Image: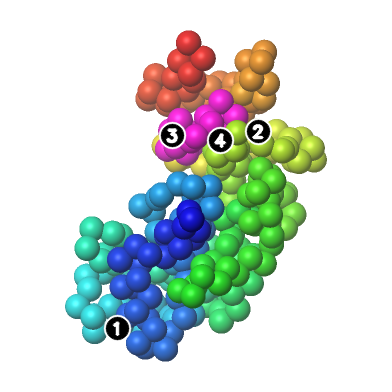
Amino acid sequence: MKEHPLSVLLDQQSIQSLFDIFDRESKEICLVGGCIRDALNGKITRDIDTAANVVPDEIIEILKKNKLSYEDYAYKYGSINTYIGDQKFQITTLREDVNQIGRHTDISFTQDWKKDAARRDFTINAMYLSNNGQVKDFFNGKEDLINSTLRFIGNIEDSIQQDFLRIFRYYRFLGIFAEPKLIKEYEAVLVNYCEQSFNVLSNDLIRQEILKMFNSSFPLNSFFSNKKTMEKQYWVELTKKHFIKTGYEIGLNRCLNKIDLLIN
């Protein structure tokens, strides 16, 4: 009998070691986000994010106690990185984002897992997995994943205004589905805010997100609104014009110009 994909994820030795460390301290920690999404899609990822109902200073003390190295450069956002073997883990205290402007936000720590989930971008990225295999799924992300639907958490306009990079992340995550089921109301909103995003996001940040699209399972979905006629998504031409206007050659030559190679 084939092992359940979440069991394959949980059975990894480094993940079990991390759970054991926090269990000994009677603290709750869960895997969150992309590693769960990928596991349910039958993919193995090395990008392991976790969430914990432990404040950063306590996380650091637990890691020190267990002689684990750590990085605290994202301390102000409640995130601590650590390594077990060659596996990197990001451990982030449950939080709410407040006064968010672009990618910058003030934070407030919480003990409420649903409030932590509500600050995330898409339902498929807001699932939590505990050591016993229980999934916390407050916004039906698993159902959306099964149905090949990419859904913003909460109001799409509010979500984009909180972080304009979510426009490009939306198109990136369309590429995980063979045949994504699009939500009709989204396209007009995404088009409306795309040009505004250039006033907030750096060219480098946009380029990095686009490059990730090429590594998706179905990258054509990210770049083309109609794969039969090869009509490009609106954001592609708009971003190309912006890169030309700002003289961003690396974004053109090493990024956007690669799109046409996908169909040759």
Marks 2 and 3 close (CB-CB < 8 Å): no
Classed neighbour count for the residue bearing mark 1: other residues with Cα under 10 Å, few (<14), some (14–19), many (≥20): few
Q: Residue at x 34, y 62 (%)?
A: 12
Inter-mark Cα distance, 4 to 1: 40 Å
* Part of the protein shown in magenta: 206-222
Q: CA distance from mark 1 to mark 2?
A: 46 Å
- Helix, strand or loop at mark 4: loop
Residue type at tag 1 = Glu
Say what secondary structure mark 1 lies in: helix
What amino acid is at disc 2? Glu
Given residues 31 and 91, the one toward you in this image is 31
User: Which of the two marks, 4 or 1, is nearer to us in this view?
Assistant: 4
- Residue 162 locus on image (x, y percent): 62, 54
**Residue 168 pos. (x, y %):** 56, 39
Q: Is residue 103 visible?
A: no
- Secondary structure beneath dot 3 equals loop
Amino acid tagged 4: Gly
Q: Kindly identify which residue carries mark 4.
A: 175
Q: Earlier in the sequence, mark 1 or mark 2?
A: 1
Determine which residue is flagged by label 1. Answer: 61
Q: Is residue 78 left or right of residue 144?
A: left
* Pick the front one: 6 or 173: 6
Label for residue 215? Answer: 3
State how far apart marks 4 and 2 are (Cα): 9 Å
